[in-house]
Image (spheres, rainbow, N blue to C red):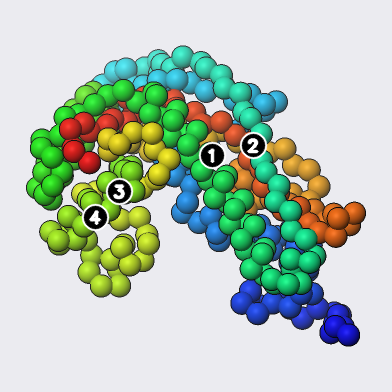
Amino acid sequence: MGSSLTYPVPQIRGTESMTTEQIHQLLRTQPLIAKRIRTLAEQRFISDALLKGRFKSVGGVVLYENGEPLFAPDDPESIMPGGEYPRSQVTAGDLAAARVEKWGRDVPVTDESIGRRGIDVVNRSLNQLVNRMVKFVDSAALGVIASKVTTTSAASGAWTTAAAIVKSVELAKAGAEESGEGHTIDTIVLKPTAYATVMSIFLDAGLLPREASNPLITGAWPQVLDLTWLRSPHTPTSAPMLVDTDELGGMADEDLGGPGYTKSLPGVEVKSIREDLTDGYLLRSRRVTVPVVTDATAGLTITGTGL
């Protein structure tokens, strides 16, 4: 005879040695599922790091102003004591609209797999959900960004030395600052292979922190040359992409609600559905969103790096 089930189920404190009863309890507790997805997906969504704006969709559509100027049209003026302040009519960009889409996927987990493989089958299923959602959303967002951002800056030379990288990046940043658009570049995105090359050059040149704070050890996004360096296999261009994340755009998410759904990340909803007819669960993730680029001049690519 197999071991009998024990109730009440002991409190879940960790996941390394969870009993079968505890795993079923986890799958019936939506906040615990959301917490596990949030942990697995931490720092994975590049789209939310680049498109930092948060737009709220109503009725499946988001309205936004495209190309809104960063500066008021007139300079400040000297004001005499007790004098009135001159007024400027602040201009807005052209009004545009985008339609959100609901993207989602279910992954089944059976009672047999839980009983035989334990928490591992749940972790693997959640990992698959997270990885596929990240891949799809990031690919869509990066594709939109790459299609909108057309400004380029020529590299000062192949990126084989720290000096060449520094000069190329600083010239690109300076060009953005001097363009008259008022952009301050704060983030750069590279393909993983290009990222590995650049980080190894930075490491040899002593541009990365040492020991415990080294981002190559911690896995944190590095801060070098006053930029956050990101990597993503989903960027459609091999050229380094630099952006002003405060002005580039945002993700427009719609909160559909619905019983049993909980939010694990911005815009991402998850749900565990018990399927008694098949003796199992459906683990579901969904995101109702659309990436929106509101200012294409807030980004550029560096050409001729040889990466």
The image position of residue 18, as x and y in percent, is 69, 77
Residue flagged by tag 3: what amino acid is it? Thr
Name the mark nearer the viewer: 1 or 3. 3
Which numbered disc covers residue 199? 4
Q: Distance between the residues labelled 1 and 2?
A: 9 Å
Residue flagged by tag 2: what amino acid is it? Trp
- Determine crowd level at label 4: few under 14, some 14-19, many 20+ residues with C-alpha closer than 10 A: some
Above or below residue 49? Residue 85 is above
Q: Quadrant of the C terminus?
A: top left
Q: Distance between the residues labelled 4 and 3?
A: 10 Å
The image position of residue 229, as x and y in percent, is 31, 49
Residue flagged by tag 1: what amino acid is it? Phe
Q: Distance between the residues labelled 4 and 2?
A: 34 Å
Earlier along the polypeptide chain: callout 1 or callout 2? 2
Earlier along the polypeptide chain: callout 4 or callout 2? 2
- Determine crowd level at label 2: few under 14, some 14-19, many 20+ residues with C-alpha closer than 10 A: some
Asked if the residue at tag 2 contacts the one at tag 1, i.e. Cβ–Cβ closer than 8 Å, the answer is yes
Q: Name the residue under label 3.
A: 193
Which numbered disc covers residue 136? 1
The image position of residue 14, as x and y in percent, is 63, 76
